[in-house]
Image (tube, grey):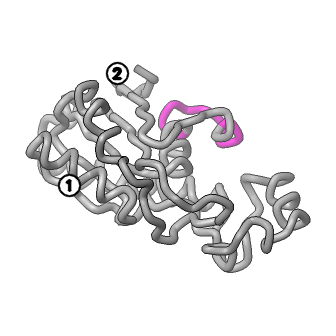
């Protein structure tokens, strides 16, 4: 099985904590996608976070590759709870420092932490694999494209490759960045 993980295009939300909130894409993002399309191989299926910044890209990929898009809520970004749509300044340095000291375990009020995000993403992926595997005998040959967020992509990648969750911060995926994973027998590797 092959996975192509793509982060959504750049957004216009400078200085704002947005997590699962809808935020506008930067003007001109479509022109950046054209060069991306030349580097991608047609998948069998496209999975996307239901947030518009991901679905907009997934729609472009769908049109280009003539492949169905499956909206997958488990791919949504970290839920920042009451911090959503607040400026980082109004959240305050003390709260941000508490989060920085325990990125995996800290959650904003009414939000989720990185461990919860990782669990949601892995359970969602495993559930999709089970459903897709029941529909297709060619699961080992499947190429799936996933359009998601920095948090969901990094959590999925470290878990599939068997790395400790704390290494999630070591991975960097820029807007419109691409990460490739391949499964050889039962082992996932970066390709």
Q: CA distance from mark 1 to mark 2?
A: 25 Å
Q: Which residues are magenta?
A: 159-167
Nearer the observer, 162 or 97: 97
Q: Quadrant of residue 37?
A: top left
Nearer the observer, 8 or 188: 8
Q: Position of residue 111 (x, y in %)?
A: 65, 73
Could you tell whether 51 is left or right of 155 in the image? left
The residue most toward the front is 27
Q: Is residue 76 placed above or below 86 in the rendered structure?
A: above
Q: Residue at x 29, y 57 (%)?
A: 56
157 falls in the magenta region? no
| Disc 2: which residue | 184
Could you tell whether 19 is left or right of 136 in the image? right
| Disc 1: which residue | 69
Specify the label residue 32 is tagged with.
none
Q: Image quadrant for the N terminus?
A: top left
Q: Categorize mark 2 by other alpha carbons within 10 Å: few (<14), some (14-19), many (20+).
A: few
Q: Is residue 156 placed above or below 18 in the rendered structure?
A: above
Q: Residue at x 25, y 36 (%)?
A: 34
Nearer the observer, 15 or 103: 15
């Amino acid at each position: 099985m092959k996975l192509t993980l793509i982060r959504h295009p750049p957004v216009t939300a400078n200085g704002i904590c947005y997590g699962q909130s809808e935020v506008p894409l930067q003007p001109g993002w479509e022109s950046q996608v054209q060069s991306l399309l030349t580097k991608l191989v047609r998948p069998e299926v496209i999975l996307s976070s239901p947030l518009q910044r991901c679905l907009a890209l997934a729609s472009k990929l769908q049109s280009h590759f003539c492949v169905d898009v499956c909206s997958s809520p488990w791919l949504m970004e970290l839920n920042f709870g009451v911090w959503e749509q607040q400026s980082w300044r109004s959240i305050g340095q003390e709260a941000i420092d508490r989060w920085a000291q325990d990125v995996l375990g800290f959650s904003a009020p009414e939000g989720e932490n990185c461990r919860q995000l990782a669990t949601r993403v892995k359970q969602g992926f495993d559930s999709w694999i089970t459903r897709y595997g029941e529909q297709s005998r060619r699961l080992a040959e499947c190429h799936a494209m996933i359009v998601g967020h920095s948090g969901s992509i990094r959590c999925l990648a470290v878990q599939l490759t068997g790395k400790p969750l704390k290494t999630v911060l070591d991975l960097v995926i820029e807007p419109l960045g691409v990460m490739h994973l391949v499964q050889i027998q039962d082992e996932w590797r970066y390709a």
